[in-house]
Image (tube, helix red, strand yellow):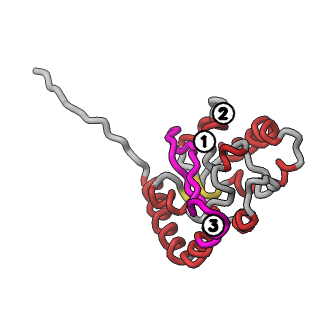
Amino acid sequence: MSYTVETQDVIIVPKSAWMKRIFDVVFAMLAFLLLSPLFFIGSLLAKLQSKGPVFYKSERVGKDEVIFAMYKFRTMVVNADTLGGSLTTYKDARITPIGRFLRWTKLDELPNLINVIKGEMSLIGPRPEAPDYVKYYTEIQKQVLLVKPGITGPSQLANRDEEEKLKGQQDAEHYYITELMPKKLALDLHY
């Protein structure tokens, strides 16, 4: 006598992943409510700086190499992507005066909470990178793409002065790809 057992693929998610997701959503929603006055001010400042949308959507590579739109307050002139490279340094002429303030205070990052609520990002994790830079990752470095990216994480904290580091470089993009990005990824791999 033989028996056949039909099975379905079951994905087992560790309890800690569910707990982290619940924490992310609850904290992001509370932060969204508590910081709504700052959100309003950021929106107003972004709108006052020039014509165009309040939010800037940037393609980022998330968990499992899924591309998503990361939200930020717009800090640059409209169509800035067509006026220069994808790397932005502190003295970039495309940054508006109000945008410089939003970046300095990190208020431009508040809309990342939307990505956390949507499940595309976490509060803590490796910072998501643009596809143009992920193509330079080694197979080992790609392991950071196995976890949900975060608003803040190890490399973000260690490189708060990233724009300062880039501004003194002859070729900022080359320096970022060959020097800074590998160091950031090394920190994120420990996460």
State which mark lies toward you, 1 or 2.
Answer: 2
Does dot 3 land on a helix, a strand or a loop?
helix
Q: How far apart are marks 3 and 1 (CA)?
A: 32 Å
Residue 49 vs residue 144, the one in the foreground? 49
Judge whether 147 appears above or below 15 on screen: above
For disc 3, the neighbor class at 10 Å (few under 14, some 14 to 19, many from 20) is many
Q: Tell me whether circle 1 and circle 2 mark residues in contact (CB < 8 Å).
A: yes
Sooner in the amino-acid sequence: mark 3 or mark 2: 3
Residue 110 left/right relative to 173? left
Q: Nearer the viewer, residue 57 or 31?
A: 57
For badge 3, the amino acid type reads: Ala
Mark 1 Cα within 10 Å, few/some/many (few <14, many 20+)? many
Identity of the amino acid at label 2? Tyr
Foreground mark, 3 or 1, reads 3
Q: How far apart are marks 1 and 2 (CA)?
A: 10 Å
Q: Which mark is residue 144?
A: 1
Which label sits on residue 84? none
Residue wearing tag 3: 46
Q: Which residue is drawn at 49% across and 58% down?
A: 20
User: Magenta includes 130?
Assistant: no
Q: Is residue 36 left or right of residue 165?
A: left
Q: In this view, does 170 lie to the left or right of 92?
A: right
* Relative vertical location of residue 145 with respect to residue 46 in this rendering, above or below: above
Q: Mark 2 points at which residue?
A: 137
> Residue at position x 31%, y 36% from top?
9
The reply, left or right, for residue 84 in relation to residue 36 is right
* Residue 59: x %, y % from top left: 56, 45
Looking at the rendering, which quadrant does residue 82 occupy?
Answer: top right
Start and end of the magenta stretch?
44-73
